[in-house]
Image (cartoon, rainbow, N blue to C red):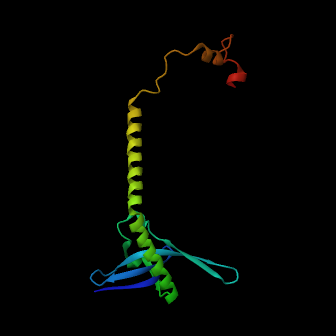
Amino acid sequence: MIESKVLMLLMERGEIIISEVSYDQTKPGLATFITPAVILVERGPHGVLGFMLSAWLPSELMTNTHITLSQHLLTGTMVPNPEMVSFYTAWAKTERDKMKSFGKDFTAQIQAIEKYHVDKYHSSKHRQKKDIFISSPEVSPEVIALFEDENGGWGDPSTSH
């Protein structure tokens, strides 16, 4: 049997996450977070509380918004008030809708980035095959003049220090 409910979770690293959490009784010790969001909280000097939700995972790069974690990574669970559950539910729905709407755009971007990196690798590999740093075996008289003076010394100190 799978149970599911929206919870606020205190993670081992200190984040406060809100998510629909699913526990599968056949997989003890694991919890599945469905569209998890980190809660960013700012408390003003006079007790005014401001907060926002931000995606906890790069869901644009995943096939779905689920993550299964070991329950030992949770330090605590809290029951959010009904208004917070409603707010989170609306936020999570829009995040899942964005995944569907922009999925093709993200796929095209990832393919373009992949092509760029492959092309860059091949061009650098091609450049390594060329002997681009081989210079002429002869040094020009102008360069020699910078380092040697008429007396056989080290040249003009104002030029070569």
Query: In this view of the protein, can residue 155 be seen by the observer?
Result: yes
| Residue at horizontal 42 percent and vertical 64 percent from the top | 102
Q: Is residue 3 left or right of residue 51?
A: left
From the viewer's perspective, is residue 121 above or below residue 17? Answer: above
Image location of residue 34, percent across then percent down: 39, 76
Q: Residue furthest top?
A: 150
Q: Quadrant of residue 143?
A: top right
- Residue 81 visible in rendering: no
Q: How many marks?
A: 0
At a point 37% along the width and 74% down the height, the residue shown is 69
Instruction: Say which of 39 and 93 sits in front.
Output: 93
Side (left or right) of 49 relative to 59: right
Q: Viewer-proximal residue, 68 or 114?
A: 114
Image quarter of residue 31: bottom left
Q: Which residue is outermost to the right?
A: 158
Identify which residue, 43 or 83, lies in the foreground: 83
Q: Residue at x 41, y 59 (%)?
A: 105
Q: Position of residue 15 (x, y in %)?
A: 51, 75
Q: Residue at coordinates 67% horizontally, 15% vertically from top-left?
A: 153
* Residue furthest out toward the front: 101
Q: Position of residue 108 (x, y in %)?
A: 39, 55
Residue 139, x across and y down, in percent: 55, 16
Quadrant in which the C terminus is drawn: top right
Location of the N terminus by quadrant is bottom left
